[in-house]
Image: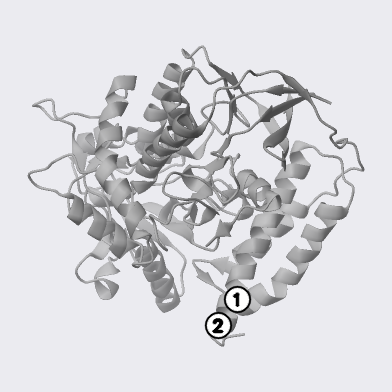
Amino acid sequence: MIFKEYDVIIVGSGISGLYAALNLDSSFKILMLSKRELTLCNSALAQGGVAAVMDDENDGYELHIKDTLIAGGYKNNLDNVKILVEQGPKDVKNLLNYGVDFDRNSDGSIDLTLEGGHCRHRIAHHKDSTGYEIVTSLIESVEKLPNVTMLENTHLLGLEKRNESFLADVLHDGKHSYYTTKTVILATGGIGRIYDFTTNSAIATGDGIQFAYNMGAQIKHLSYIQFHPTAFADRENRECFLVSEAVRGEGAYLLNCRKKRFMDKYEPERKELAPRDVVSKCILKEQKETGSDEFFLDISYKDPEFIKNRFPMIYSKVLEKGYDMTKEPIPIYPCQHYLMGGIAVSGCGATTLKGLYAAGECAHTGVHGINRLASNSLLEALVFSRLIAEDINKNLAHTELCEREFDYPSPDGKPLPKGIRTEIRHIMQRSYFILPDYKEALKDIERVKQLKDMLDNGGYEVTPDYIEAKSITTVAYIILSEVVDEGREKGII
């Protein structure tokens, strides 16, 4: 099999992948793979903004670090948190060079808003669609780079390491293509599609984590999963529309089934501005007390024009669902949102496998601890993807690229049975929603292991469906293994 060689292959076209490409040496030949269209990624769905200390008079690194540690239950990697917070403002300001249009104050300064868990206004934003604004601006910049080849609607069907080289089997335009490189950056996003309900996009099936795991890279704290408390309560669709943290930051109230505020019972000081995991757990407590899973978010007491101008996307989305947030509360309920664990990386984004890097949601830098602080995700994506690029620029030797020949297994095989992904989603929703159910996890992990062994050794045709089923099952197996171990340590099972 003939493999075309690149200096660097980037898997994923979210903010991490794009910003890495922009910071890599322009002499490197780079291949970027996007599973679907370039803008279909979790980065583009980010509404609230990017957190950074931009107001030195009223804010400081120590305060941002403290907020991050409190939200993360002090389980954070402090060294990496310092890197995140202290280097972050430089990267946020650098986005302006790529045309990112942050909202401004009347004096021209960047408008900074407040979100749950933050003690200061430090969230730079573009209305309520910050991620999309950043992604589209960076795509436009990357497309101008002559050294970067971007492939949309391209599925990575195989990634393995042979000595110093990585071999990639890629399906593009219905045909298999084969590539090799000594350096790979995995920027494949989250794992939300392992749940019945998630805010994540369709690409979030944990593919990068599965490939890294099967190549022998360390995976760390995959059970550190965040459930966002204010997803729109749409019981009919798996992909739930997120109602941004920023809505509570601007003063929205959480209401129970009786349309009464309840957060003051559980969090008298922080109330609605408590960190996400705290709010989600409070909702579960209130659900148990009232016997109802109906909850609402209400900002209708604010000026209607302010709401429409500050949250134009959210306003239009919920209006499509039959609710006018300027006049009435809107239904919300927690659902899976973000992964804090992932592929273990160093401060420069390097995994335990030489030549393999990981960035963004699929990576575990440790900056988030057990719960991510609002709007720290885009900051992490920027800072650590730049550090990856700097490390590669420093260490990757310039060599003449050519086509190389390797033996590679055929993708042919028998058809994949239907229903595997649906079964895994039901298992995960049952065994680990906000709080783990250790006894259910102990029962369910046997079935997940059975499915994983079947996919690993069943001789199935290697298709996009097969890879996603294998990724979802592998990720579920790792998560439930961690949950079961924790349950045993606690003496619950």
- SS under mark 2: helix
Q: Residue furthest right?
A: 414
User: From the image, which quarter does the C terminus lie in?
Assistant: bottom right
Q: Looking at the image, is 391 positioned above or below residue 141?
A: below
Q: Looking at the image, is 72 positioned above or below residue 165?
A: below
**Image location (x, y in percent) of residue 479:** 61, 63
Question: Quick one: label 1, few (<14), some, or many (20+) residues within 10 Å?
Answer: some
Q: Amino acid at mark 2?
A: Glu
Label 2 vs label 1: CA separation? 6 Å
Residue 489 image label:
2
Q: Amino acid at mark 1?
A: Asp
**Image location (x, y in percent) of residue 205:** 63, 46
**Image location (x, y in percent) of residue 179:** 71, 26
Is residue 212 visible in this depiction of the protein? yes
| Residue 262 in the figure: left or right of residue 382 | left
From the image, tell me which residue sits under label 1.
Answer: 485
| Residue 7 in the figure: left or right of residue 325 | right
Closer to the camera, 231 or 369?
Answer: 369
Closer to the camera, 355 or 477?
Answer: 355
Q: Looking at the image, is 222 positioned above or below residue 246?
A: below
Q: How many marks?
A: 2
| Residue 487 in the figure: left or right of residue 298 | right
Is residue 117 visible in this depiction of the protein? no
Q: Residue furthest bottom?
A: 491
| Residue 401 in the figure: left or right of residue 131 | right
Residue at x 60%, y 55% (from the top left corner)? 195
**Image location (x, y in percent) of residue 224:** 49, 62
Residue at x 21%, y 52% (from the top left corner)? 251
Closer to the camera, 249 or 166?
Answer: 166
Asked whether the residues under the numbered discs 2 and 1 touch, taking CB atoms below 8 Å apart as contact, a structural biologist would say: yes
Which image quarter: residue 1? top right
- SS under mark 1: helix
